[in-house]
């Protein structure tokens, strides 16, 4: 396939690498000519663009939207208007209204929309889903998430996180956590959140967030997200019969019963593998092949995750 990658900062270059590795034709597009030049040099490319509106008119099978959040909707809509399938990096958009615009455009065009919640393809995720949904720990009562990700700011190739109007900060940046909690525990009915802007970080929006979620099935979730604690991504789920712990950094999972029995699982971690799996799902959807429901993060699914994230921001802003 012929694939246009719009936005070739850190995450866009990772997607370009995956597309190229899988044997597809990749074409970069970014308003920053230096970033475009990096991709062209790495893969010996001759075609590239600095303007997405010009780029999408050049007959691409699919467009990968890897821009700052506030540009997701205009780029996706332009791609659909020219007949391309669209992959949008998470979150689907910067606002719920923009997310609906993307969903409507995909439906009107009759083209695929996939949103990049790559943790659904993470090593061990299938086993985590099996254990959390099965009888291993019984009905889930609570979940706890701890995330620290300063490396995101180190790797960033643009400053969009510095402004609420373009990026928002750690909540939308790591809406992955909200996505997989919805996958594991069901829909969210209520959100409470406190945030803090940290003056020593290059982020004008929240650099730290503490969140409580009430799930429709009855479970309660606690999340702490920040750009400070070094490389930490942990999940704990507590149930009637025991608990599950999952470390995304090491792909190590432990299932423990309250009686003392423990099962441990580990998987090798190669981050690009999850992105390769994600693109294969996108290609399968384009080809009309069936994929597992938990791998098809369509527009409506991603919109629900965004709605929880926006509710958390409102809770912090309005103190309610």
Image (cartoon, grey):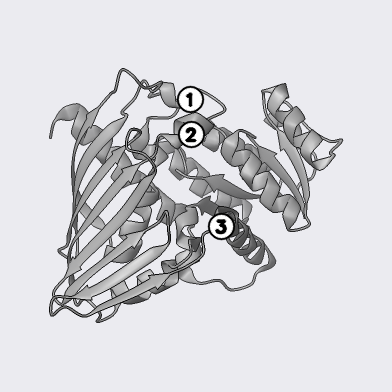
N-terminal of the pair, mark 3 or mark 1, is: 1
Badge number at residue 215: none
Question: Mark 3, mark 1: which one is toward the viewer?
Answer: 3
Q: Nearer the viewer, residue 195 or 192?
A: 195
Residue 147 in which image quadrant: top left
Image coordinates of residue 190 in percent, x first then y, are 18, 49
Left/right of residue 279 with respect to residue 142 in the rendered view: right
Spot occupied by residue 23 in the image (x, y as percentages of width and height): 78, 57
Q: Cβ–Cβ below 8 Å for labels 3 and 1? A: no
Foreground residue among 187 and 169: 169
Residue designated by label 1:
160
Q: Provide the residue designation for mark 2.
A: 69
Q: Give the CA distance from mark 3 to mark 2.
A: 26 Å
Residue depicted at x 35% and y 63%: 183
- The location of residue 9, given as percent across then percent down, is 61, 33
Instruction: Confirm whether residue 80 shows in the render.
Output: no
Whether tag 2 and tag 1 are in contact, CB under 8 A, the answer is: yes
For discs 2 and 1, the disc positioned in front in the rendered view: 1
The numbered mark, 3 or 2, whose residue comes first in the sequence reads 2
Residue 109 placement, left or right of 39: left
- The Cα atoms of the two marked residues, 2 and 1, are separated by 8 Å
Judged from this view, the residue extending furthest toward the top is 199
| Residue marked by disc 3 | 270
- Element marked by disc 1: helix
**Label 1: how many Cα within 10 Å (few below 14, some 14–19, many 20+):** many
- Which type of secondary structure does the marked residue at label 3 adopt? loop
Q: With 261 as the anchor, is 301 left or right in this view?
A: right
Tell me the residue at 29%/40% (across/down).
Answer: 225
Q: Quadrant of residue 126?
A: bottom left
The quarter in which the C terminus is drawn is top left
- Badge 3 density bin: few <14, some 14–19, many ≥20, Cα 10 Å: few
For label 2, count other residues whose C-alpha is less than 10 Å away and answer few (under 14), some (14-19) or many (20+): many
């Amino acid at each position: 396939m012929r694939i246009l990658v719009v936005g070739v900062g850190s995450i866009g270059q990772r997607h370009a690498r995956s597309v190229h590795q899988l044997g597809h034709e990749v074409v970069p597009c970014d308003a920053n000519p230096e970033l475009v030049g990096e991709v062209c040099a790495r893969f010996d490319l001759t075609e590239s663009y600095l303007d997405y509106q010009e780029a999408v008119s050049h007959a691409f099978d699919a467009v990968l939207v890897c821009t700052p959040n506030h540009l997701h909707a205009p780029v996706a809509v332009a791609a659909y208007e020219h007949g391309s399938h669209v992959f949008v990096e998470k979150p689907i958009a910067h606002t719920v209204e923009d997310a609906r615009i993307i969903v409507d455009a995909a439906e009107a065009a009759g083209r695929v929309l996939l949103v990049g919640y790559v943790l659904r393809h993470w090593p061990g995720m299938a086993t985590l889903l099996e254990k959390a949904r099965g009888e291993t720990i019984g009905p889930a009562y609570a979940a706890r998430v701890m995330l620290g990700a300063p490396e995101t700011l180190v790797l960033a190739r643009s400053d969009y996180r510095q402004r609420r109007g373009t990026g928002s900060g750690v909540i939308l940046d790591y809406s992955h956590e909200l996505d997989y909690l919805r996958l594991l525990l069901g829909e969210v009915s209520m959100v409470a959140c406190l945030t803090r802007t940290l003056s020593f970080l290059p982020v004008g929006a929240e650099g730290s967030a503490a969140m409580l979620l009430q799930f429709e099935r009855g479970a309660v979730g606690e999340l702490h997200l920040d750009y400070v604690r070094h490389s930490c991504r942990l999940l704990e789920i507590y149930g009637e019969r025991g608990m599950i712990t999952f470390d995304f950094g090491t792909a190590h999972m432990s299932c423990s019963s309250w009686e003392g029995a423990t099962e441990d699982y580990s998987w090798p971690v190669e981050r690009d593998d999850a992105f390769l799996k994600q693109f294969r799902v996108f290609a399968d959807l384009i080809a009309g092949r069936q994929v597992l429901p938990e791998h098809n993060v369509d527009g409506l699914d991603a919109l629900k995750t965004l709605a929880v994230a926006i509710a958390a921001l409102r809770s912090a802003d309005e103190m309610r």
